[in-house]
Amino acid sequence: MKKLLLLLLIPVLGCQPNNKPSLNTTQLIEDLRFISSDATEGRRTGTEGNRIAREYIITRFQEEGAEPFQDSYTHEFTFESRRTQEEMTGINVIAQVEGKMDSIIVVTAHYDHLGRNDSLIFNGADDDASGTAALLALADYFVKNQPNHTLIFAAFDAEEMGLQGARAFVEDSVLLSKIKLNINMDMISQNDSSEIYAAGTYHYPETKSILESIDTAGLKLLFGHDTPDLGYNDWTFSSDHGPFHSKGVPFVYFGVEDHENYHKATDEFETIPQEFYKSSVQLILNAILAFDEQ
């Protein structure tokens, strides 16, 4: 009788539902492929390729059902070029998913890159088409699974020209007091040791215990790159989380260490290890879900 009972239990246990939050990884890879393709010509701010990438991101937000932020998917700003001192225009792309509370988590990546240099196109697959495609995948997930906090998904422009899109967002935002956290993604798709960093816990130690509790999707989640003694290796102001930190908004910055393709024309879709990338985005989703419970 005991043997029969055991046999009856085995198929039942084998049919237990998988409650792991799931991303559309097929679409994730397709978004990465297009954003980092020659069609967007390296996405340098102010160029036709940058416009093509921007229109693609807007279309994808619309297809997913993510709402425009404050009635518009675009946030235009001007800044002075550090190289030429001329006035330039950048355009952020921003969507939102309304939560059950007024408090806000802002999830960010930058869609611009270095553009062209003569015949070379710097497609920036890891930097930061990877973060931008992840932004779209995460928005798609939360459209289908309403968060507790309102989530803003911001694809910033002109990061490569001095974090200009993020600076403009925090300066223009009337919602700054409601933002409880910035989660920034910049270079999240390429590492030979299956490692990804979450920087910021030195400044905001309350975030570390939450991050230590998440499922890391088979990757090594490391902490660091955020203390003043590290010089160049201190990432506190290295990407779009910097302007949030300057305003006192806590941040977690997900990124990998520099690799051989960093800021080179070899940073192409074909060089991205897709399984690592999918796991990286899953890890970040798990982190957002954990922070959303706070």
Image: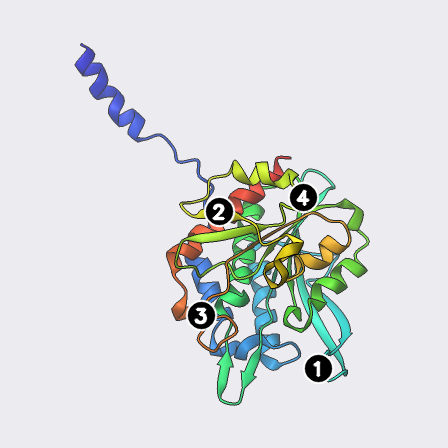
The quarter of the picture where the C terminus appears is top right
Of residue 8 and residue 47, the one placed in the foreground of this image is 47
User: Mark 4 or mark 2: which comes first in sequence?
Assistant: 4
Of residue 64 and residue 77, the one placed in the foreground of this image is 77
- Residue positioned most to the front: 229
Distance, label 3 to label 2, CA atoms, is 21 Å
Residue 221, disc: 2
User: Mark 1 or mark 4: which comes first in sequence?
Assistant: 1
9 relative to 255 in the view: left or right: left
Residue 265's place in the image compared with 25, above or below, is: below
User: Mark 1 or mark 3: which comes first in sequence?
Assistant: 1
97 relative to 196 in the view: left or right: right
Distance, label 1 to label 4, CA atoms, is 34 Å
**Residue matched to label 4:** 204
**Residue matched to label 1:** 83
Q: Is residue 103 visible?
A: yes
Q: Amino acid at mark 1?
A: Arg
Q: Position of residue 189 (x, y in %)?
A: 46, 60
Distance, label 4 to label 2, CA atoms, is 17 Å
Q: Amino acid at mark 4?
A: Tyr
